[in-house]
Image: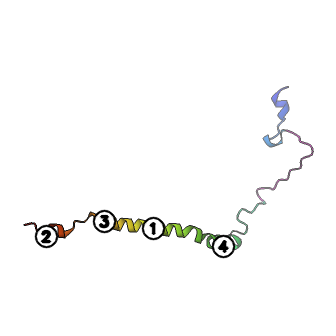
Amino acid sequence: MRLTSILRGQHFGNLAKVHGIVTYKLSPFEQRAFAGAISKGIPNMFRRFRSNVFRVVPPFVVGYLVFDLTEKQHTQMLRKNPAEFANDV
């Protein structure tokens, strides 16, 4: 059996006939990709932000405070103590 006789000009998605399975297709010209993006998407974005902000922000705040304290302590430890050099002539 030749491959051309199997295909018979059919497209790749329609090569076999499957009985008992129903498929539905919607034309790409009838789909609305951004349907409700403004009216439903933006309020949903704010709702999701409000629900997660208290889970995400506190670790970042604590991390920043630890980093800032460590940097200040490091800068202070790099300085020389003037009392150690008071007797130098």
| Residue linked to disc 2 | 86
Please give the label number shown on residue 47.
4
Mark 2 near mark 4, Cβ–Cβ under 8 Å? no
Q: Nearer the viewer, residue 43 or 77?
A: 77
* Amino acid at circle 4: Arg
Rounded to the nearest angstrom, the CA distance separating label 2 from label 3 is 22 Å
Question: Could you tell me the amino acid type at mark 3?
Answer: Thr
Q: Position of residue 84 (x, y in %)?
A: 17, 67
Residue at position x 85%, y 32% in the image: 6
Q: Residue at the right extreme?
A: 20
Instruction: Mark 3: give few (<14), some (14-19) or many (20+) Cα within 10 Å.
Output: few
- Distance from Cα at disc 4 to Cα at disc 1: 26 Å
Residue beneath label 3, please? 75
Residue indicated by mark 1: 64
Q: Provide residue 30's location: percent of width, then percent of height.
A: 78, 60
Q: Secondary structure at mark 1?
A: helix
Binning the other alpha carbons within 10 Å of mark 4 as few (below 14), some (14 to 19) or many (20 upward) gives: few
Give the residue type that dot 1 points to. Answer: Tyr
Magenta part of the protein: which range? 16-29
Is residue 24 in the magenta section?
yes
Give the answer, above or below, for where 45 lies relative to 8.
below
In this view of the protein, which residue sits in the foreground, 38 or 83?
Answer: 83
In-image side of 45 versus 89 (left or right):
right
Q: What's the distance in space between the residues labelled 4 and 3, CA to CA? A: 42 Å
* Residue 69 on the magenta segment: no
Mark 2 and mark 1 lie on one chain; the one further toward the N terminus is 1
